[in-house]
Image (cartoon, helix red, strand yellow):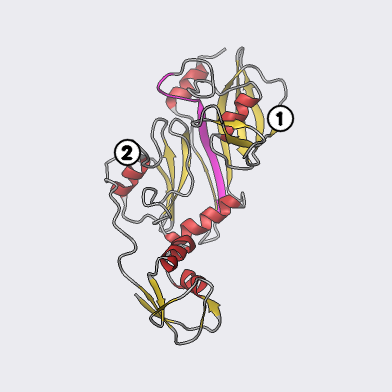
Amino acid sequence: MKIVVKENQIRLDKYLALNTDYSRSLILKMIKDGYVLVNKKVEKPSFLVNIDDEIEVKDGFIKEDHINAEKMDLEIVYEDEYLMVINKPSGIVVHPGAGNYSNTLVNGLKYYTDNLSDGEDETRPGIVHRIDKDTSGLLLVAKTNKCEELLSEMFKKHSINREYIALVHGVLTNDKIKIDAPIGRDVKNRKQMTVTSNNSKEAITHLTVLKRYNKFTLVKLKLETGRTHQIRVHMKYINHPIFNDPIYSNDKATEFGQFLHSYSMSFIHPITNEELSFKADLPTYFQDYLDNLN
């Protein structure tokens, strides 16, 4: 692909970001690896291009991925040409990873459409954020690289509002709680996260009690930050772990996993500027269990 520059004194990476569908991160990789030439020379991302300069983006950088397309019943809550909102069931991994390359949401998305963003990682086309395997509910998917880049920036700025519903052990006395406790990797178990001051990141969760039972509490949780396992770690930290959590609760868990559901999401569409708001009902297994509680 060749592009003739129409502006003066603009950074190479910025010009490509404005005039292609590639994400900024992918552009930086292509420039670094020598796949972008300015007047047949390799230049730095900060190089200032001028009118009539010729930018060439060489073929071969973006390789075909090897993710199998697999038929899957996707519950699509919303879709347009730029993004999708999926209601993910419990038990489905979001994207392929070590030892798990099939039966993920990405495999199902690949079967459904070829229009997914490339992303920085070829195993995660369309994926802007993730929720745990056994967490159910709303998930955003980007269909173009531009949309992925803009959504990623929105997540960083916390301008996408997400709320979860969870059933937790014990009866909470306070109606509202703000949990402000940094989260980092557990040094004793690298597969888990924990509240710690060592190599941690700020993590804030807002909790509101919805209903109290004899031995449980149904709560609504709003994320101010988005750390790995944040809600599960924070609930364990305040001694009210999520019911049926196989990692952060001491009780035995069924195959359904933790009773945690991403039920609400609202944001301004990054392309159309439309206000979007979505809600997803609790999974049947979750709701049936609540209906039988005292």
Which sits in the foreground, 232 or 283? 232
- Give left or right: position of 38 versus 64: right
The amino acid beneath tag 2 is Asp
* Quadrant containing the C terminus in the rendered view: top right
The magenta stretch spans residue 260: yes
In the image, which disc is placed on residue 73? 2
Give me the residue at 62% from left, 52% from top. 157
Q: Is residue 228 magenta?
A: no
Examine the rendered structure and indicate whether residue 37 appears above or below residue 294: below
Image coords of residue 74 (percent x, y): 35, 41
Query: Is residue 269 visible in this depiction of the protein?
Result: no
Q: Position of residue 254 (x, y in %)?
A: 42, 19
Side (left or right) of 172 relative to 284: right
Give the SS element for disc 2.
Answer: loop
> Could you tell me if residue 134 is visible in this image?
yes
Res. 176 mark: 1
Of callouts 2 and 1, which one flags the residue occurring earlier in the amino acid sequence? 2
* Boundaries of the magenta span: 254-268
Kindly indicate whether the residue at mark 1 contacts the one at mark 2 (C-beta within 8 angstroms).
no
Q: Which is nearer the eye, 77 or 173?
A: 173
Q: Main secondary structure of the magenta part?
A: strand
Against 211, residue 154 (above or below) is below
Secondary structure, mark 1, is: strand
Quadrant for the N terminus, please.
bottom left
Tell me residue 113's x, y (percent): 31, 52
Q: Position of residue 192 (x, y in %)?
A: 52, 30
The outermost residue toward the bottom is: 52
Three-letter amino acid code at the position of disc 1:
Lys
Crowd around label 1: few <14 · some 14–19 · many ≥20 (10 Å): some
Q: Is residue 17 above or below residue 55?
A: above
User: Callout 2: 10 Å neighbours few (<14), some, many (20+)?
Assistant: few
Marks 2 and 1 sit apart, C-alpha to C-alpha, by 37 Å
